[in-house]
Amino acid sequence: MLRAAFWLTALVFLPVGLFLYFLSPSAATLLGVSPLWLARVAGGVITAWGAFLLVSGVRADEGSVFPLAAGNLLTVAALVPPALRLQDTLPAPIRTAMLALSLALTLLAVVGLLAVPPHRSRL
């Protein structure tokens, strides 16, 4: 279950990061992203985080669960306020996607925290 939480979270972050990293100027104007270099830096960071999650999913343990949960919850904390505050200016599909992504990341953080393997002592 813990590996699934890592891999599903990586499957969220990797495409989003790659999309932002290779964002075309026409898509940037459609999304209202300015300046374009900021989206590319954010895309690189998000892609690196997704790759870290993918690698951590191979050998999931107690030490790697807390960065998963913290990263997911920090992303949720960054997405929810603008989605709620900018209801008049954000298009409804984008706002719905932001809130759905926030819900998915919150659920994956909770699943990761609940699926922590028990600590075994080596005596």
Image: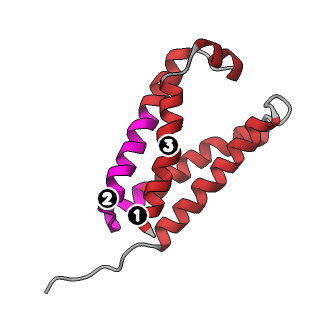
In the rendered structure, which disc, 2 or 3, sits on the residue that comes first in sequence?
Answer: 3
- Determine whether, in the image, residue 95 is placed left or right of residue 18: right
Label 2 to label 3: alpha-carbon separation:
17 Å
What is the x, y in percent for residue 37? 49, 16
According to the picture, the residue beneath numbered tag 1 turns out to be: 3
Identified at 41% across, 72% down, the residue is: 116
- Determine whether, in the image, residue 118 is placed left or right of residue 105: left
Farthest right residue in view: 88
Depth check, front residue: 13 or 89? 13
Secondary-structure class at tag 2: helix
Label 1 to label 3: alpha-carbon separation:
15 Å
According to the picture, the residue beneath numbered tag 3 turns out to be: 13
Is residue 48 rendered magenta in the image? Answer: yes
Quarter of the image holding residue 34?
top right
**Circles 1 and 2: CB atoms closer than 8 Å:** yes
- Magenta range is 45-67
What is the x, y in percent for residue 51? 37, 43
What type of secondary structure mainly makes up the magenta span? Answer: helix
In the rendered structure, which disc, 1 or 3, sits on the residue that comes first in sequence?
Answer: 1
Quarter of the image holding residue 2?
bottom left
Secondary-structure class at tag 1: helix
What is the x, y in percent for residue 85? 78, 38
Identified at 40% across, 63% down, the residue is: 3
Q: Residues within 10 Å of mark 2 (few under 14, many from 20)?
A: few
Q: Residues within 10 Å of mark 3 (few under 14, many from 20)?
A: many
The dot on residue 58 is 2
> Which kind of residue does numbered mark 3 sit on?
Phe
